Image (cartoon, helix red, strand yellow):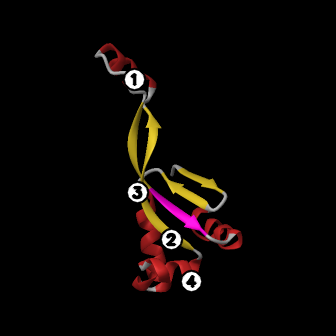
Amino acid sequence: MKVTIKPDLIIFHKPSEWEPIQYQLGLDYGTKIMLSWVCKRELGFTVRRHKGLKPHDAVEWEVMKSEGWNHRYHYQEQIHLDFYNEAQQTWFVLKYLNN
């Protein structure tokens, strides 16, 4: 699982890696938890889709350069969890990411 944890932010680099956690949240709290204001009130974060820049891997980049490309990065679909409380972020990491 490729997840980046920053202050007030957790990034799932592949949306498919967020889906099992989203499903577990639904089991634990009911499907209403995915409403943004309910999730913020109960768990201290909101969920958003984001397109982040990601560098091409080395082999892919060499092929692209030989074909005349000069863009080193491409957009990657991501899921961002924006936290409003450090304690709630720590709780989330321990409960759902520390497997």
Tell whether position 80 is magenta: yes
Magenta region: 79-83
> In the image, what residue type sits under mark 3?
Pro
Q: Is residue 65 above or below residue 15?
A: above
Q: CA distance from mark 4 to mark 1?
A: 44 Å
Element carrying mark 1: helix
Q: Which residue is mark 2?
A: 46
Task: Please tell me which of labels 4 and 1 falls first in the chain.
Answer: 4
Q: Nearer the viewer, residue 2 or 7?
A: 7
Question: CA gap, disc 2 to disc 3?
Answer: 15 Å
- Give the residue number, with chain letter if any, for mark 1: 61
Q: Which residue does the image show at 45% across and 38% down from the upper left? A: 54
Q: Quadrant of residue 7?
A: bottom right
Residue 10 vs 23, above or below: the answer is above
2 and 3 marks in contact (CB < 8 Å): no
Q: Quadrant of the C terminus?
A: bottom right
Dot 1 or dot 2, earlier in sequence = 2
Callout 1 amino acid: Trp
Marks 3 and 4, the one that precedes in the sequence = 3
State which mark lies toward you, 3 or 4. 4
Q: Residues within 10 Å of mark 1 (few under 14, many from 20)?
A: some
1 horizontally vs 56: left or right? right
Against 32, residue 80 (above or below) is above
Mark 4, residues whose alpha carbon is within 10 Å: few (<14), some, or many (≥20)? few
Q: Which mark is residue 15?
A: 3
Looking at the image, is mark 2 or mark 3 earlier in the sequence? 3
At horizontal 68% and vertical 67% (from top left) the residue drawn is 90
